[in-house]
Image (cartoon, rainbow, N blue to C red):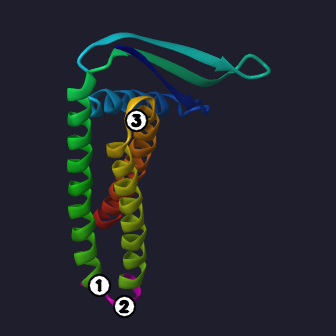
């Protein structure tokens, strides 16, 4: 089955390169997470503001759906990512426990926030597992969004620890 996925990004002056790199990463993550083996086409178009200035980009990817086997692979990949991030959260919690009282409270709050995001991603993944047909695609998009939010939050927290 042939499917189409649309990605969008707002463009800001002097930030376009980073926004295009983030758009590329989102497309690549989508393709990898879904086990897509055949991309049929990729096209970009720019949206314009009232004065004709570029304000956004739309990227459309047409691909061949990997089918039921792909679904199993997607769910397995998502479960593994969720476990990996859970381990990373546990490492952060361990480091937070070794800090002084004031710093510990700050990082424990971040760990609680990460755990909340992890639980939301876990719930979304469970909904995807139970769904079928077209509902599966819609729920998968929500689970993917929750997973990406968790990923960014974990990476941001880990980066703070490295400073």
Point 37% across, 62% down: residue: 119
Of helix, strand and loop, which one carries label 1?
loop
Q: Which of marks 3 and 2 is nearer the N terminus?
A: 2
Nearest to the eye among marks 3 and 1: give it.
3
Q: In which quarter of the image is residue 97?
A: bottom left
Asked if one can make out residue 35 in the rendered structure from this viewpoint, the answer is no
Query: Do labels 1 and 2 touch, CB within 8 Å?
Result: no
**In the rendered image, which quarter contains the N terminus?**
top left
Give how far apart the Cα atoms at labels 1 and 2 are. 7 Å
Taking the image as shown, residue 153 lies to the left or right of residue 35, namely: right
Residue 7 higher or lower than 140, as above or below: above
- Residue beneath label 3, please? 136
Q: Nearer the viewer, residue 160 or 70?
A: 70
Q: Residue 101 carries which label?
A: 2
Q: Give the residues drawn in magenta, as a range.
A: 98-103
Please check the rendered image and state whether residue 10 is part of the magenta-colored stretch, yes or no. Answer: no
**In the rendered image, which quarter contains the C terminus?**
bottom left
Point 48% across, 17% down: residue: 60
Q: Where in the figure is residue 22, as x and y percent of width and height? A: 42, 34
Of helix, strand and loop, which one carries label 2?
helix
Of helix, strand and loop, which one carries label 3?
helix
Please check the rendered image and state whether residue 99 is part of the magenta-colored stretch, yes or no. Answer: yes
Q: Nearer the viewer, residue 145 or 11?
A: 145
Q: Where in the figure is residue 36, as x and y percent of width and height? A: 27, 22
Q: Residue 99 carries which label?
A: 1
Residue 41 higher or lower than 132, as above or below: above
Residue at the far right in the pictured view: 50
Q: Where in the figure is residue 134, as x and y percent of width and height? A: 44, 29
Asked if one can make out residue 90 in the rendered structure from this viewpoint, the answer is yes
């Amino acid at each position: 089955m042939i499917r189409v996925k649309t990605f969008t990004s707002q463009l800001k002056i002097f930030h376009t390169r980073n926004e295009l790199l983030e758009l590329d990463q989102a497309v690549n993550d989508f393709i990898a997470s879904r086990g897509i083996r055949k991309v049929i086409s990729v096209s970009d178009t720019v949206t314009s503001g009232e004065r004709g200035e570029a304000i956004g980009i739309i990227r459309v990817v047409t691909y061949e759906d990997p089918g039921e086997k792909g679904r199993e692979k997607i769910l397995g990949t998502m479960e593994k990512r969720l476990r990996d991030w859970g381990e990373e959260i546990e490492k952060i919690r361990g480091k937070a426990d070794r800090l002084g009282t004031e710093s510990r409270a700050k990082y424990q709050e971040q760990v609680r926030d990460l755990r909340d995001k992890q639980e939301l991603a876990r719930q979304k993944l469970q909904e995807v597992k139970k769904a079928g047909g077209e509902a599966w695609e819609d729920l998968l998009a929500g689970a993917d969004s929750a997973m990406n939010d968790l990923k960014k939050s974990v990476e941001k927290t880990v980066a703070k620890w490295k400073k």
